[in-house]
Each structure stands twice: as structure tokens, then as C-alpha cells.
Amino acid sequence: MKKVLVVDDSLSVARQLEKIISESGEFTCVGHAKNGAEAIKMNHAEDPDIICMDMNMPGMDGLTALRSLSMLDKEVKVVMVTSLGGVGDKFTEALKLGAKNVISKPFEADDVLKILRDL
């Protein structure tokens, strides 16, 4: 079973993602970080296979965290979660930094699971 770390400053979005992941039977949610700095610490502690990370958060945002994660020896697959969808400079930068895909807010469970399965 693949381990997923959820990173989002919105508790409601994080809980929705955690529920989708936990109820899938294919993935397990190993935790919830509220910003990029927490995500980096939890990545080390929990060793997830996938990180679902919001792009815009207070403190360290998702793009800054993605830069740090991309420099690690162990590759972790990062999926950005954003209301920007698949357009804009931040989306393009996320892909250049190594994000594998994007989940657009608002999202449906089937869409989230399809993206995670494709990793």
C-alpha cells in the first residue's frame, strides 16, 4: 500500500483528501502537514511515497518545499493541489521542479484516485 502525506493549510481540504485516500483501500494517509516546512520534516519522519501538497500556503509555500524535496536522495512523488488548475506560471514552475501532476480544487474522489494510481 502506498503511503501519502497530505499538505494543506485548509483543514477542510486536508480532511477531504485524507478521507479519499484512507477509504480507497489502495493508499494510506501517513499524516497532515499545514505548510511546506512541516511537509519537509514529515517527509523525513514518515517516508511517504506520494505527497499531495497545496501550492499556496502561509509560511513556506508548496513551490519552495518542492524545491527542497527535489534535492533529496530518495525521490518522493509530489502532486500539487491548487485552485489554479493546469494554467499559469506557478503550475509551469511546479512541473519544472519535478511535480508529477496537479489536482485542481474543487476535486472529486475519482479524479484524485486516478492521479494517484497513475504515479
Image: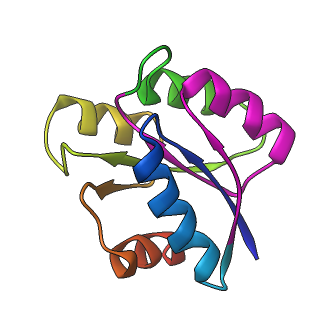
Q: State the residue lying farthest toward the front.
A: 12
Q: Which residue is drawn at 74% across and 39% down?
A: 43
Residue 65 shows in the view: yes
Q: Residue at x 75, y 36 (%)?
A: 42
Q: Is residue 107 above or below residue 40?
A: below
Q: In which quarter of the image is the N terminus?
A: bottom right
| Colouring style | rainbow
Q: Residue at x 54, y 27 (%)?
A: 35
Q: In this view, does 43 lie above or below 26?
A: above
Q: Give the range drawn in magenta.
A: 28-56
Return the x and y of residue 109 as percentages of the image width and height. 39, 76
Return the x and y of residue 78 as percentages of the image width and height. 53, 48
Tell me: 45 left or right of 21.
right
Q: State the residue lying farthest toward the bottom.
A: 25
Image quadrant in which you'd find residue 72: top right
Return the x and y of residue 54 as percentages of the image width and height. 41, 40
Q: In which quarter of the image is the C terminus?
A: bottom right
Q: Nearer the viewer, residue 11 or 26?
A: 11
Q: Does the magenta stretch include residue 1?
A: no
Image quadrant in which you'd find residue 39: top right
Tell me: 29 left or right of 108.
right
